[in-house]
Every structure is written in C-alpha cells, then in structure tokens.
C-alpha cells in the first residue's frame, strides 16, 4: 500500500493538471475558435493570433493527456480518491480561469475576453466569478475527501 501522503499528492496533482488542461481546452474551443472573441495573443496580426492559438491548444492537450496518464496510474495502484481527484479538477479549472482573467487579461493585456463591447467589466466579472466558484467548489470537495478518510 502506498503512503497516504504520496497518494493524496498524486490525486491532487493529476486532478489539477487535468482540470487546468480541460479549462484551457474549453477556452480555446469555445472563445477562440467557435465565437472568435479573441486569440491567445492579440497584440500582433491575426495570423500570429492563430499561431498562438495553436500553441495554446497543444499546451491544453499536453496538460489534459498528462493528467489522464497520472489518473490511469492512480487507478492501477488502486489509490485514486474520486472526490479528491474531482475537487482537484475543479481547482485546476478555477486556477486556469483566474490566471487567465487576472494575469493574461488585465496585467499582461495579451488579450481580452471580448472586443467591441460597451462594458467589458461585466464579462470580466462573470469570467473571474466562475473561476472563484470553481476554486471554492474544489476546495470544499478536497476538504470533504480528507474528512471521510479519517472518520
């Protein structure tokens, strides 16, 4: 039997990696490709924006696949804690969303959620609000997973 601390860490890392990649994938597919609201890098030509989207998409898939490989390893070792893993998925998704909304949108200004709208603040509030909800839900699930193991 694997050390519980190592197992908990692997559940968390796998879930965060998968959640981060999944949120990046959804962002890329929905906001970049389907809605055409922005590119990953909008400070140059649209051609460079498309190239940056390609790199961003590749990154999201590497993170997602890496998280799934780690999940497969957890299941092989019979050390997966589903509620902890799903909590970490929400945590990873929320972290990505908040990082994107604060660092990339506001501090670096490499792109905005949407261009040509009257009030961008509403979009920012929804974007970052969803991130905070995901983070809170993830933290709650992870805390609950710890209680069940010690009862």
Image: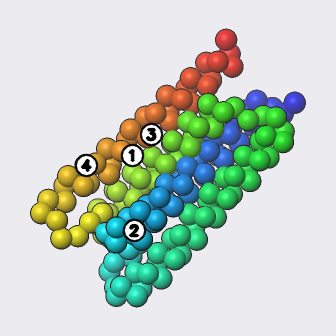
Residue located 82% across and 34% down the image? 78
Query: Whole-Å distance between the Cαs marked 1 and 3?
Result: 6 Å
From where the camera sits, is residue 108 visible?
no
Query: Whole-Å distance between the Cαs marked 1 and 4?
Result: 10 Å
Residue that label 3 marks: 135
> Which of the two discs, 1 and 2, labels the residue nearer the N terminus?
2
**Tag on residue 14?**
none
Query: Whole-Å distance between the Cαs marked 3 and 2?
Result: 26 Å
| SS category of the residue bearing label 2 | helix
Q: Residues within 10 Å of mark 4 (few under 14, many from 20)?
A: few
**Left or right of 36 on screen, residue 77:** right
Quadrant for the N terminus in the image = top right
Residue located 46% across and 65% down the image? 29
Residue 48, compared with residue 7, is above or below; it is below
Numbered disc in front, either 2 or 4? 2
| SS category of the residue bearing label 4 | helix
**Tag on residue 34?**
2
In the rendered image, residue 108, in percent from the top left (x then y), is placed at 34, 68
């Amino acid at each position: 039997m694997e050390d519980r601390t190592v197992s908990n860490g692997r559940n968390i890392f796998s879930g965060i990696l998968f959640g981060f990649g999944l949120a990046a994938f959804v962002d890329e597919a929905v906001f970049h490709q389907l809605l055409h609201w922005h590119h990953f890098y909008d400070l140059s030509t649209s051609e460079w924006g498309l190239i940056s989207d390609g790199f961003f998409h590749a990154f999201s898939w590497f993170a997602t696949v890496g998280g799934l490989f780690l999940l497969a390893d957890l299941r092989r070792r019979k050390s997966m804690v589903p509620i902890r893993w799903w909590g970490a998925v929400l945590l990873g998704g929320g972290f990505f969303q908040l990082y994107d909304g604060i660092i990339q949108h506001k501090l670096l200004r490499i792109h905005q959620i949407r261009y040509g709208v009257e009030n961008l603040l509403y979009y920012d509030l929804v974007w970052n609000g969803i991130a905070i909800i995901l983070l809170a839900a993830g933290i709650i699930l992870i805390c609950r997973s710890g209680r069940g193991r010690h009862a």
